[in-house]
């Protein structure tokens, strides 16, 4: 068997590709109601002040704050209630000294009012008057014009993932359509003489194709659009033909399996001979997932993932996902989501290799425990059981039971 020519650290493998990639984002306009999970293609700017008028944050009375100064339970301020401002209506009353108007949460203030007294801090006296038991400062219990967003403010910057709250603010501003990055199409090809479609029954020596589907799910999760090219045997002309189809129908090409160095592994040749510059990286210093290929074919990123379903998924996260994000102009949040937990068992690792260890989180007595899910690396059940992953860095020899570790969550 040939050896890997030049194994590189995972982040270097990714950088090698990203450095050469043209990441000019293609935008498209979608309905805001359909924009969840998409990435903004431009700064989204507020067309107006929100709110456009001062709103009460309480049920109570709008007042002139100075009329309440010095008020207390023993010496309340006295006001005449001269009307109310109904919800969804503009005020019909204008306050003079010593006057108040009924206010509702979210409603407008009466003209002349600059604060709202909570109903709990008032007492009705007689007909149409109140005692105010506590003073309010000007602006108290009021959302000012533009306090939420001001006209011209960037409410969501370009390159940001649109979340539920973002959908909310856009509708609040009347923005019913948004420009988002097109979802990169990712062509997926599964290779291997032993593979059969999942609906078939595998004969002796055959296995069902997992990777077409797990990789497609990861593509969707990353914001891309999976394009199934299909199952291809270990045959060079057929794989080359499939690869060309894939590059025609996809912005990104992902090959599963055949990425190693045996005589049956031809992905590296296929990807290298499709177009310049070809294979950039063959072999990453990572466990699982050493047999990984990173290529660029006429400006399109192409990958050879290891066939082992666990490795394929882990490597996808390292090199393919960031490329999908880059093609959408996505700026990643500055922190990786995860939790700190105490390791329950030793983890051994070779230096010069980054290890991803699957862990299950267990609620301990007064802390969270990270329990490594060991087992042969090709068991997909280890991934299914896991809640997250602990990364042992390149230059680390391992971790010990009792160490505090950071668990990146799935
Ligand atoms: P390879 O990368 O071709 O050496 O394959 C490594 C292992 O992964 C072998 O046991 C393959 O049978 C298995 N494998 C390859 N492709 C798939 C797939 N699409 N689904 C499930 N297992 C696969
Ligand atoms: Mg194979």
Image (tube, helix red, strand yellow):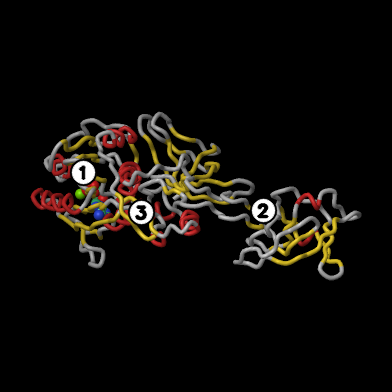
Residue 104 on image: x %, y %: 68, 64
**Corner quadrant of residue 393:** top left
Specify whether 343 is left or right of 40.
right
Specify whether 134 is left or right of 395.
right
Residue 87 on image: x %, y %: 63, 67
Disc 3 Cβ-to-ligand 1 distance below 8 Å? no
**Which residue, as the protein is rendered here, is positioned at the far left?**
237
Q: CA distance from mark 1 to mark 3?
A: 30 Å
Regarding mark 3 in the picture, which secondary structure is present there? helix
399 is higher (above) or lower (below) than 34: above
Residue 268 on image: x %, y %: 17, 41
**How many C-alpha atoms fall within 10 Å of the one at disc 1: few (<14), some, or many (≥20)?**
some
Q: CA distance from mark 2 to mark 1?
A: 54 Å
> Which callout, 1 or 3, points to the residue nearer the camera?
1
Write the residue at 40% across / 29% down: 395
**How many C-alpha atoms fall within 10 Å of the one at disc 3: few (<14), some, or many (≥20)?**
some
- In the rendered image, which residue does mark 1 sit on? 300
- Say the numbered circle drawn on residue 142: 2
Q: CA distance from mark 2 to mark 3?
A: 56 Å
- Say the numbered circle drawn on residue 225: none
Earlier along the polypeptide chain: callout 2 or callout 1?
A: 2
Disc 1 Cβ-to-ligand 1 distance below 8 Å? no
Earlier along the polypeptide chain: callout 1 or callout 3?
A: 1
Pick whichever, 307 or 34, lies toward us.
Answer: 34
Write the residue at 28% across / 51% down: 184
Earlier along the polypeptide chain: callout 2 or callout 3?
A: 2
Residue 288 on image: x %, y %: 34, 42
Regarding mark 1 in the picture, which secondary structure is present there? strand
């Amino acid at each position: 068997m040939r050896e890997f020519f030049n194994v590189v650290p995972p982040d270097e493998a990714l950088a090698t590709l990203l450095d050469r990639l043209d990441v000019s984002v293609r935008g498209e306009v979608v309905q805001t109601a359909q924009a969840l999970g998409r990435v903004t293609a431009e700064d989204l700017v507020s067309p107006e002040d929100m709110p456009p008028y001062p709103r009460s944050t309480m049920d109570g009375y709008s007042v002139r704050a100075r009329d309440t100064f010095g008020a207390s339970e023993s010496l309340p301020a006295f006001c005449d209630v001269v009307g109310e401002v109904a919800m969804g209506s503009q005020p019909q009353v204008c306050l003079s000294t010593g006057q108040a108007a009924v206010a509702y949460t979210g409603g407008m203030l009466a003209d002349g009012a600059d604060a709202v007294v909570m109903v709990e801090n008032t007492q009705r006296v007689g007909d149409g008057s109140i005692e105010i038991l506590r003073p309010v400062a000007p602006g108290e219990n009021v959302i000012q014009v533009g306090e939420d967003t001001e006209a011209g403010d960037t409410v969501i910057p370009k390159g940001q993932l649109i979340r539920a709250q973002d959908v909310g603010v856009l509708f609040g501003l009347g923005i019913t359509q948004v420009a988002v990055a097109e979802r990169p199409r990712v062509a997926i090809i599964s290779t291997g003489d032993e593979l059969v479609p999942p609906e078939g029954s595998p004969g002796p020596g055959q296995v069902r194709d997992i990777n077409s589907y797990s990789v497609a799910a990861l593509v969707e999760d990353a914001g891309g659009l999976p394009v199934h090219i299909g199952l291809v045997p270990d045959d060079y002309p057929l794989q080359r033909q499939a690869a060309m189809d894939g590059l025609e129908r996809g912005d990104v090409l992902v090959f599963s399996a055949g990425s190693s160095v045996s005589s049956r592994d031809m992905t590296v040749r296929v990807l290298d001979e499709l177009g310049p510059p070809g294979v950039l990286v063959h072999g990453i210093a990572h466990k699982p997932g050493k047999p990984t290929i990173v290529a660029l074919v006429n400006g399109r990123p192409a990958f050879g993932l290891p066939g082992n379903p666990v490795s394929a998924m882990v490597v996808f996260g390292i090199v393919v996902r960031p490329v999908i994000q880059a093609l959408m102009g996505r700026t990643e949040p500055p922190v990786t989501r995860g939790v700190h937990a105490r390791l329950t068992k030793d983890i051994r690792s070779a230096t010069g290799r980054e290890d991803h260890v699957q862990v299950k989180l267990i609620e301990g007595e007064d802390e969270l425990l990270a329990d490594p899910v060991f087992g042969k690396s090709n068991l997909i059940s280890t991934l299914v059981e896991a809640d997250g992953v602990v990364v042992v860095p390149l230059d680390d020899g391992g971790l010990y039971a009792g160490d505090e570790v950071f668990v990146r969550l799935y």
